[in-house]
Amino acid sequence: MLLSPLVYAYIGDAVYELFVRNKIIAENPDLTPYLYYLKTTMYVRASSQAIAIKRLYEELDEDEKRVVKRGRNAKSKTIPKNAKLSDYKYATALETLIGYLYLQNNIDRLNYILSQVYKIITEEQRNTKDN
């Protein structure tokens, strides 16, 4: 790991948000910008990302687990406004992994992780609506 985990998280946040926006537009081409925003927030909120990385963790290789751990333990000066601190740390861990894979140009693995995260959060949203 050459960069700070928070630098990887910074890049990972942008990569993840763009992935989510593209997926939502592809699945829902006729929504208004506000509805795109609402759908996107379901995927990018810290609590959703925390659920996804916890469920995905056992699928990661040892290097990826190390990156996640460093991201989760990174000391950020940012205080979460609308999230529990634990969710925020796990969300940072996910974004760190995404940024790391992106900057390592490991695009196949990155796409797999992004797709799995999206799938997990989609399932969680459906389960929440059903209950």
Image (tube, rainbow, N blue to C red):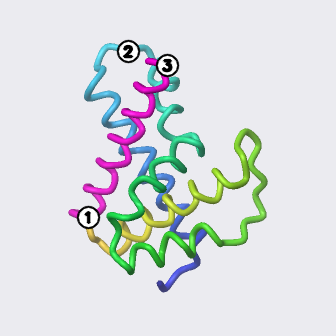
Q: Which of 96 and 122 is in front in this view?
A: 122
Q: What's under tag 2, amino acid-wise?
A: Leu
In the image, residue 70 lies at what x, y percent?
Answer: 57, 75
Pointer 3 residue: 131
Relative to 90, 103 lies left or right: left
Q: In this view, does 44 lie above or below 91?
A: above
In the image, residue 1 lies at what x, y percent?
Answer: 47, 84
Q: Give the range drawn in magenta.
A: 107-131
Q: Please give the label number shown on residue 109.
A: 1
Q: Quadrant of residue 45?
A: top right
Q: What's under tag 3, amino acid-wise?
A: Asn
Residue shown at 48% from the left, 52% from the top:
14
Question: First in sequence: mark 1 or mark 2?
Answer: 2
Q: How far apart are marks 1 and 2 (CA)?
A: 30 Å
- Magenta span: predominant SS is helix
Residue 110 forms part of the magenta stretch: yes
Q: In which quarter of the image is residue 124?
A: top left
Circle 2 crowding by C-alpha within 10 Å: few under 14, some 14–19, many from 20:
few
Relative to 36, 107 lies left or right: left
Contact, mark 3 vs mark 2 (Cβ under 8 Å): no
Q: Distance between the residues labelled 3 and 2?
A: 26 Å
Residue shown at 34% from the left, 51% from the top:
114
